[in-house]
Amino acid sequence: MTTHRPAGVHAAWLPPEAFRAIGSRRTLVHGAGLLVGTVHQEVEQACARYGGAVVRLEPRTAGEPYDGDGTFDLVLALSAPEPPLPGAAQVPACLRGEGRHPAQPTGDEGYTLARQGGVTVVLADAPAGLLYGLFHVVRLGESAFGGDRAPELHRPAVRSRMLDHWDNVDVHPVMGQVERGYSGGSIFWRDGAPRGDLARVRAYARLLAASGVNAVALNNVNVHATETRLLTDRLGDVAALADVFRPYGIRVHLSVGFASPVVLDGLPTADPLDREVRAWWAEAAGRVYRAVPDFGGFVVKADSEGQPGPFTYGRSHADGANMLAEALAPFGGVVHWRAFVYDHQQDWRDRSTDRARAAFDHFAPLDGEFHSNVVLQVKHGPMDFQVREPVSPVIAAMPATRLAVEFQVTQEYTGQQQHVCYLGPMWSEVLGFRPWGADAPTVAAVAAGGAAYGGGAEGGGLVAVSNVGDDPYWTGHPLAQANLYAFGRLAWEPRADPVAVLDEWIDLTFVPVVSGDPEPLRSTLHAMMDGSWRSYERCTAPLGIGFMVRPGHHYGPDVDGYEYTPWGTYHFADRDGLGVDRTRASGTGFAGQYPAPWSEVYESPERCPDELLLFFHHVPYGHVLRSGSTVVQHIYDTHFAGAEEAAESRRLWQKLGAGGLVEPALHARVAERLDEQVRSAEEWQDQVNAYFFRKSGVPDAHGRRIP
Ligand code: GCV
């Protein structure tokens, strides 16, 4: 029997106590195969702890009736079992097995949930649906077993819900074991070798499945020499990890270097149109699928930040992606080709080059040229995971291409898991954004594709960079676990209310282990977390301008840190004003990459939403925002407010106290991070306010101290 978690590791959102309601009841698990085995094992473990019972039935053929007539509180069964299950009289009539239950199929991963006559039933067409249905029952707790529940069909909005690990196999001299990782080392690798802690990986797979994630890329998109060998002599490492993810319905993918044929086998070229190169990739794909038959595919960062790519050979990104797609196609694999391509060596003096334009300029002309097993993976904003960016115009520009939208769960620019910053509300806003205006499809619909996208290309799904490491709390800051949970849940149901998702996480993580009334804990966590993304925005770069962080590691304020560098991330502040003119009329023309109505809204400083004003316009400090405040006064007000909100969070957590509601070690970990958050928020406040006071000479209207 597996354990729920390795010793010394926090259970995150599935402590054994979360299964209390199921564990004390009688459950029937019906169905065959690996994932049904996982379902059975989960219930069995809960029953061993809480005294319930579980019966496992393999499907039989019609005419071979089941023995006995069990009485069950919970039935988890593959749809339309024939012959009927024992105790079938308990199964609600609408779901009973004479033929199919209500017309709609559940698909590969969906399930129907109902309760009638004292029995709770989960029916699914396929085993993965049973697993997701089980976790739904876990979320419901005791309420899954009270009253009646009309049949509800639950299916994921997008098929592919993937986490990318930026884990290095070797320790990188600058980036460490995990690039942009804030939770210790990798859970897969240590110092060039597999960690071999497969119990930890299994516990991770279980957490991911319970949130809805079904794919994982194991290594960094910046592929160094050792990671390249994951395709050859290190393939066994990949197969071992795939074996652990598989029972939780999660497929593994690998990031591959475009120059692999050159690096690994000394081919003279990696030209995607070269016959030998194509044969090399076909052979490599075959080898991977022999080791991992359900392998998901390749992730590629090409011609980006120094990674090799097709431009070297005068080929297009469609040529590059399609070559890999052809190698994977015989096995049903997919290429996730990243659209994060821009000039990272631009001249800061050149005001006409605009990094925000780059992905659209490179990729929009290629719409329709990618094979159907290529997914173009687009960062949600045009720059790079800032606390506030407009939605990337690429998302609306490629109706004939499978698009995936990429988020960053790891908090590179949002406090590095030192700060509380619940990102659910940001992702929810992006997913619900309608690039073509009211009544037109949302970003989530583009990621879902097909019918949801008005008959557009099949969707590429949602992807996010993981925030997990070998830290005992998984994510460094224990409250950063909520971001991982929320990504999975919002990928499954993008319309879910992010505050309700946070509540679910609290319910699954803390409430099962609280002795006494959990309400003070719940309300404290909501007060600290619900608005923490906007609070973090107030603390840092104002009105959508972005960056202003310390170059390299990206933590803490440095207003001019990137201003005179080649990275294309400028604010252009001078004595009169700040912001980037991205209009068609007088700027870089980026606003014109959007369809109407946003091309017009963003073009106009009067209509542009305040929070994006400086992303699209260069304005004087005295420019009056839609809120009625001036730009410079807004900068002062938000920075004072952000620092005060950080201090208030700390007060709330201190008031909650250690012991009783949260275990002392966890309380101490959060308290220590809050001290740092308060310090850092004051640093942001003072540096940003001082900078703009000195540039503009405009005093704070309220006479507060600006150093
Ligand atoms: C993995 C940003 C990060 C890099 C990251 C890159 C990417 O530039 O700072 O660490 O590289 O994004 O998304 O490829």
Image: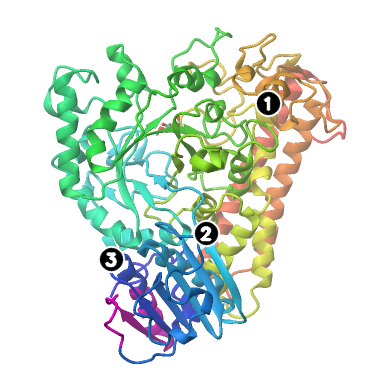
Q: In which quarter of the image is ligand 1?
A: top left
Q: Earlier in the sequence, mark 3 or mark 1?
A: 3
Residue 325 relative to residue 235: left or right:
right
Which amino acid lies under the numbered mark 2 shown in the image of this protein?
Arg
Q: Residue tagged by mark 1?
A: 598
Magenta residue span: 40-66
Tell me if residue 38 is in the magenta stretch.
no
Query: Looking at the image, do the residues carrying marks 2 and 3 touch, with CB atoms under 8 Å apart?
Result: no
What residue do we see at 51% from left, 50% from top?
157
Crowding at dot 1, Cα within 10 Å, few <14 / some 14-19 / many 20+, comes out as many
Camera-side residue of 637 and 160: 160
Which amino acid lies under the numbered mark 1 shown in the image of this protein?
Trp
Label 2 vs label 3, nearer the camera: 3
Q: Which of marks 2 and 3 is nearer the N terminus?
A: 3
Which amino acid lies under the numbered mark 3 shown in the image of this protein?
Leu
Q: How far apart are marks 3 and 1 (CA)?
A: 48 Å
Q: How far apart are marks 2 and 3 (CA)?
A: 38 Å
Q: Residue tagged by mark 3?
A: 34
Which element carries disc 3, helix, strand or loop?
Answer: helix
Horizontal and vertical percent for residue 175? 37, 36
Horizontal and vertical percent for residue 16? 44, 75
Horizontal and vertical percent for residue 423? 58, 47
Q: Which of marks 2 and 1 is nearer the N terminus?
A: 1
What residue do we see at 35% from left, 22% from top?
318
Label 2 vs label 1, nearer the camera: 1
Crowding at dot 3, Cα within 10 Å, few <14 / some 14-19 / many 20+, comes out as some
Q: Residue tagged by mark 2?
A: 669
